[in-house]
Image (spheres, rainbow, N blue to C red):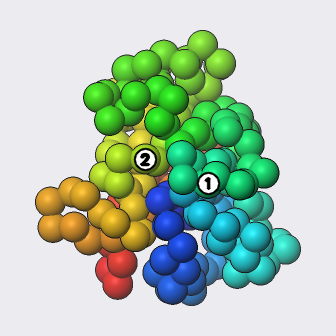
Amino acid sequence: MKVLIVSDTHRFDDNLEQVIAEEAPFDALIHLGDAEGSEYLIREWVGEDCALYMVMGNNDFFSELDREMEIELGPHRIFLTHGHYYNVSLGVETLAEEALARGCDIAMYGHTHRPYLNQEGPVTVLNPGSLSYPRQEGRRPSYMIMDMDDTGRVSFHTYFLGK
């Protein structure tokens, strides 16, 4: 199973459409907030056969998306949130604790516009970065791919726009 993970697109629709085209086909798309209205277009871009999971970010003022979501992919229970309610700009400890309390083994968030991956401990925590306003060194728009094999083992890879 191939899952495309994005966040903080902030209506940079061309960047998201480019990533969708470059990475197709994939089985699911996870958007971790701040689509700013583009959430209504994303379904068209990925097609009906692709599972789509989206949560609301701090800039999704009029969105009807859920603030948080728990999903199951294979044997994994995954906590999706934008992250601003968990003070992720200061660290991911509170987010990891919340995911663990919910029985999740993976927590995904956005908000900081910086790619992050920590697979140590009981909860894998990740952030795909931003496709619009990246803040990490080099400031390249980023996203992640989660690959899951038939046994349920996952691997995560960070990519940058245009590879």
Assess disc 1: are there few (<14), some (14-19) or many (≥20) residues with their C-alpha within 10 Å of its C-alpha. Answer: some
In this view, the mark in front (2 or 1): 1
> Is residue 20 or residue 27 the one in the foreground?
20
Q: Amino acid at mark 1?
A: Asp
Percent across and percent down for residue 123 are 47, 26
Task: Give the vertical position of 150 relative to 126 (above or below).
Answer: below
> Is residue 19 or residue 151 the one in the foreground?
19
Task: Give the vertical position of 118 relative to 18 (above or below).
Answer: above
Task: Give the vertical position of 95 relative to 139 (above or below).
Answer: above
Task: Give the vertical position of 13 relative to 78 (above or below).
Answer: below
- Residue 24 falls in image quadrant: bottom right
The N terminus lies in which quarter of the figure? bottom right
**Dots 2, 1 in contact, CB < 8 A:** no
Query: Could you say whether the residue bearing mark 1 is in a helix, strand or loop?
Result: loop
Tell me what residue is drawn at x 35 percent, y 54 percent.
Answer: 113
Q: Give the residue pinned by disc 1.
A: 60
The C terminus lies in which quarter of the figure? bottom left
Q: Is residue 78 visible?
A: no
Q: Which mark is residue 75?
A: none
Q: Give the residue pinned by disc 2.
A: 111
